[in-house]
Amino acid sequence: MPRAPDLAGSALDGRYELLELLGEGSFGRVYRARDRRLGRVVAVKVIKPWWAEDDAWVERFEREARVLARVSDPGIIRIYDIGEAEEGPYYVTELVEGESLADRLRRGALPAEDARLIAEQLCSALAGAHREGIVHCDVKPANVLLGDDGRVRVADFGVARVAEGTVQSLATTVAGTPRYMSPEQARGHPTSAATDVYSAGVLLYEMLAGRPPFEDGSLVELGLRHLQDPPPPLPEHVPAQLRAVVERALAKAPRDRYADAGEMEEALRAAAGATASNGHRPSSGAGAAAADASATRVLDRGETGTRPIEPGAAATRPIQAAATRPLHRGAERTRVLGGAPPAEPPANGTRRRGGPRRRRAWVALAVLLAAVAALVLAVVLTSSPARTIVPALRKLPRGGVEARARRLHVRPVFSERHSETPAGIAIAQSPAPGTRVDRDSAVSVVLSSGPPPVPVPGVVGKSASTAGSTIADAGLRYSLTHVAAPGTAPGVVVRQSPNAPARAPRGSTVALSVAETPEWRTLTSFSGVDDGRSVPFRILGTRWRVVYDMSYRGTCLLLLVCGGPSAEAHDESGGGSAGSFGLDEGEEKSHVFTSGPGLYRLIVSGGRDSARWSMSVQDYY
């Protein structure tokens, strides 16, 4: 890829003075700039020159500006202007003073609460885009800006998609940022708000662990890991509530994640207490002391007013207070002093009031026993769980399973396995339909995760057409990229990814590198007067040539016969000569060597007459 010129020091349209280069992406460079008209510092993104010649890329660049203008959220970079100068199309945005999350992560993992706060603000910004029906599709640390003011902002909507089921090709997705892409992007399936939720989950994982869950392998291998592998466990110090947010955000199936960034933002906000108070709970000793203190605050109502009773008096005060209260209402009031037992009635039975008292006592006891029995019966009845019937759940999608289970008061517990049934459809359940169970019982439901992975055939060395047929017969797709391949016939596959005997999801893509038609390729050029020698150069093809110009200098121009310089090709590997030729006067002359691959050097020896010459070495592959 050629390097774009640094435009710092120029002024676009005479208004935006480019002060310094801040960074660059795949098709644009971003500058710190000053708006001469409004006197403010801004950021200006300018498309690279070679993309400016492609109408499709220019339209994509302008679409990114339109997406930024469409979303009005404090967490998304604001756009001020768009234009086209002599240097190329550009747009102007606010400038965030601070650093990117990528810069911060180079210093290691973040504390749990810092990571949670950044993720919460990121999700808040993405929720603003989701409300407008826009999916970012490239959420990564470099696109998350941490302002010096403590605010998080999201940038670079260059690959954003309208959420209504847009499909991105595998090539486009992998060429983006494979460490942060969702499983559906790796499959080339439609994107949705849950796509950004997955990428935000990867960022939160990286902030907590100091590394993304998957970071090794080729582009296609990373895609397969996002599709198939569970993320490694987070460090033990991560609070359980925050760990649960990451786990749900990184679910393989979009339906198992948060529906959008707004829902994930709420979950992160709910986890605030867990990250802030983790490891700072009150000691049990302090709690016990408080409980003991509250237990001693028994009020002495036998005295005027109320006051706390000291622990030592707790056993005697209630008894003394009870001694001052009458036991029954009658003409004669009997008092029990100091808790002494009452005097027994006279033996001659003159006190006949004892009979009615006994009857009242028996009645009271019967009422008490009836109340206890009723209470026990109520407890038994209320503790017996209600029953329901397990519904038939097979052949329903996940949403249908959840709705039917909710109506019949059972709780589905999902798992997945490969099946020829389309992904997401229930293929088994336990208990069986019609079984009577307690309400809110768990019902195991197995969802299809689609057909099982298929073996990737080895096609290196085969023609592109044969390789394509072989891969298609295996239930896979393929993409072709033509590459220079010295010594290989045109149209033959020289590399593939993934390699055999790997396994890949049916319908996924195998990337094939195919040898292109040979052509002359310039390796090095040098020039001089009279004697000279080139730096060593390596030939890859079976033949190579020297294209040269030579002209005499001085008095030789007046002579009929001149003696010019000659050139010799020296084999640096074998130590001998690979051939030589004389330089005749003229332009664009050439000499072809058939010495094959190796390391060579050209040595020019002066002739009888002084001459000026220049040479280019070209390889053929």
Image (cartoon, rainbow, N blue to C red):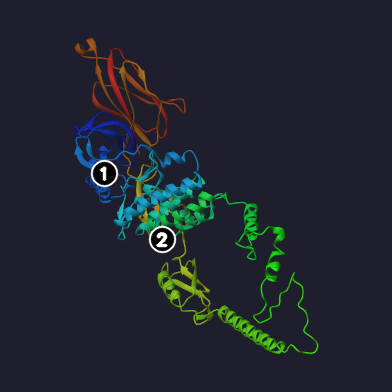
| Residue 524 percent location from the top left of the image | 34, 28
Above or below, 448 against 155 in this view is below
Above or below, 593 against 444 in this view is above
Nearest the viewer among 415 and 287 is 287
Residue at 70% in and 67% down: 320
| Residue 606 percent location from the top left of the image | 33, 15
Q: Sequence order check: which comes first, mark 1 or mark 2?
A: 1
Q: Is residue 456 visible in the rendered structure shown here?
A: no
Q: Nearer the viewer, mark 1 or mark 2?
A: 1
In this image, 394 relative to 489: left or right? right
In this image, 333 relative to 380: left or right? right
Nearest the viewer among 226 and 297 is 297
Residue 127 bears which disc, if any?
none
Q: Quadrant of residue 192?
A: bottom left
Q: Quadrant of the N terminus?
A: top left
| Residue 556 percent location from the top left of the image | 23, 12
Residue occupied by mark 2: 254
